[in-house]
Amino acid sequence: MDTGDVPARIAKAPTHIIGFDEITNGGIPRGRTTLVIGGPGSGKTIFALQTLVNGASNLGEPGIFVAFEERSKSIIANASTFGWNIPDLVDKKLFFLDARMDHDVVASGNFDILGLLTSIKAKADEMGAKRIVFDSIDVLLNLFNDPLIERKELYRIYDWFCQTGLTGLLTVRIEVDSLVDQRYGFLQFMADCVVLLHHRLVDRMSTRGLRVLKYRGSSFAENESPLVIGPRGIEISCIRMSEIEYQVSTERVSTGIVRLDSMLNGGYFRGSSVLVTGMPGTAKSTLCGSFINESIRRGESALYVSFDESSNEMVRNLSSVNICLEPYIRSGLLRMYSARTESRSAEEHLMNMRRLIEEHRPKCMVVDPLSALVKSGGQASALAVSQKLIHLAKTRGITLVCSSLLSGGETGIENSEIKVSTIADTWIHLSYVVQGGERNRALTIVKSRGMEHSNQVRELILTDNGVTLTDVYTAGGEVLMGSLRWEKEESEKRENSRIKAQIEQKQRDLELAEAEIISTIDGLSKDLENNRVERIRLAEEERERNASLIKRRTELQELRSADSNSKSNKEGTED
Amino acid sequence: MPAELSDSEKIGIRLYVTCGAPNSIMAVNNLDSIIKGLRDRCNLEIVDILKDPLRALADGILVTPTLIKYQPPPPISLIGNLSEKEKVVDLLGLGEYQR
């Protein structure tokens, strides 16, 4: 087999199909044959045509579309919905060759496609075409009705591409899932690049996928990537997880709830992703709403995506906790988008969200509930989409808050339908605590990467004025909430005042006792004083008595015989 | 022998070939032997796609060899190396002249 001149490195022709050039590191092999294999409705023709149109309009590589299966008119008409402006390209940059074999053609003996290839080459030379699509090659090969000749002609095509240097894209109609027994199985061995397109039902949801089976001389992403036929054609969501490179920020974004901000030491990180899990009715949406409300109050554009609940309902329900979004929707700062999950596959929802992000360029975004995506394509695809959404938000620096419904079971353990808790940066869990005939909402921060956060359970209280968090009452290893907390707090208050009163009483008693003692002391000191006075008086009296006694004796002596003092004194002493 | 037929009375046949390819060589030879002796009744044109590829494109020729009988109507297309001579004779309506 003549493979032509093999260049040192394989040259690639970009398809400009979103995602495909990333998967293949640059596009389909230039000057080689690429097979696009798929069952009915898998998007083969669109893929081929899109590659051709993109080449013609963006890359200066005109192309020829050889239609073996459909009429070129209907192909152009079908593709008109994608807005590719094919009619403007036709003739100069794009040539459609109707190559449907007339049903009345009679075959007599062997024939070959040399003539066709020669004609196409001439046309390609004339218009400078670089890319050729054969859609679909099996229709052409069917003409031969002989496997050996089919194979021979196919190798002729393969060689022709190698020799002419044209980039060939051949579509093949085969159910991808049963490739082995296929008549055209050998096709895959021949081509330089094989692209498989899947279209299957997963959980009753139609899902499409693309997988590159082989690519000679080039590396490629080997896993199946989801494919979506959207309003602008095919998009393949290929996120190469190996390239995780974000701008990270230490700026905090308020959660819209003051106490929660302080629990998180300031709020969410800007550009981080937050997961809010909880059972139905645990106020997940309210938490999301508070965040959005705060963001638009700061004047940052926001996007609110709700699944299975209309925007109007959302706005009305949030207004009951004093979150009024209406004016911001009208001013265009807030974009609400709601969709029914079953209506599309998870990948399509992701595409829609990507489009909304591109259009609206939000700083803050809410997806409520993210877990609804499970309904549109199963667990695996919902998880994949969630990861991609988080990745998407991160690359754009959008702070993303997603809610996820828990399907019952033990609280505190994520029994989520989507296991995204590992990829979210912050995980807030809301639960019910049933006590004393009440359900109360409890909020816990399960994790929050890269920031200090409170480990305490808080009670979430919704009021007409908004959302608040309050400390729960922990007593004896028990967490009390709601009216039990209130009762406990009240009884504690009563106990406090009782003790206070007791102390006051005691103090008063002591004061009285003290006063009594003081008055007793007063009485006693008065007695003491009296006593002292009495003693002094007695001493005085005694002195006076002595004095008067001496005086009287002297008078008496004088009366008896006025003797000399000394004599009388002598006599006196003799008496 | 009648006088020479006008073009419109003749059987118009056009054979598209890729000169040099085995099937095309066989087709030319087979056609030769089929219309042997009917040359004056046939208006035969052989188009070599290698020489005039854009014409084949315009005429909607996919495979070679392709034989088109465009006159008298209805037009009939035949593909292949024309190895089944009787089939070709029947389809071109040459039977009556051969007998």
Image (cartoon, rainbow, N blue to C red):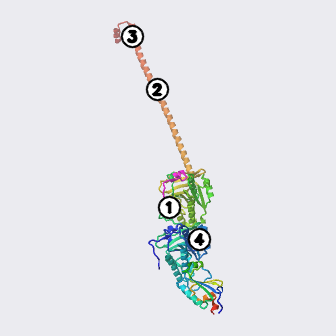
User: Which residue, given by chain and number where applicable, does mark 3 sit on?
Assistant: A554
The Cα atoms of the two marked residues, 1 and 3, are separated by: 129 Å
Mark 4–mark 2 CB contact (< 8 Å): no
- Is A260 magenta? The answer is yes
Number of the front mark, 2 or 1: 1
Q: Is residue A44 magenta?
A: no
Q: Which residue is mark 4?
A: A90
Tell which circle, 4 or 1, labels the residue nearer the N-terminal end: 4
Q: Chain of mark 4?
A: A
Secondary element at image label 1: loop
Q: Mark 2 is on which residue type?
A: Asp
Q: Could you confirm whether marks 4 and 3 are on the same chain?
A: yes
Residue hosting label 1: A423
Q: Which residue carries the number 2 mark?
A: A527
Q: Are tags 2 and 1 found on a single chain?
A: yes
- How packed mark 2 is, by other alpha carbons closer than 10 Å (few <14, some 14-19, many 20 or more), is few
Secondary structure beneath label 2: helix
The location of residue A246, given as percent across then percent down, is 48, 59
Q: Are marks 2 and 1 in contact (CB under 8 Å)?
A: no
Counting other residues with Cα less than 10 Å from the Cα at mark 3, is it few (<14), some (14-19), or many (20 or more)?
A: some
- How far is mark 4 from mark 3, CA to CA? 170 Å
Q: Is residue B76 above or below residue A273?
A: below
Asked if residue A477 shows in the view, the reply is no
User: Do marks 4 and 2 both belong to one polypeptide chain?
Assistant: yes
The chain holding disc 1 is A
* Cα distance between the residues tagged 4 and 2: 133 Å
Q: Is residue A447 above or below residue A560?
A: below
Q: How far across and how far down the image is residue A498, in percent? A: 54, 43
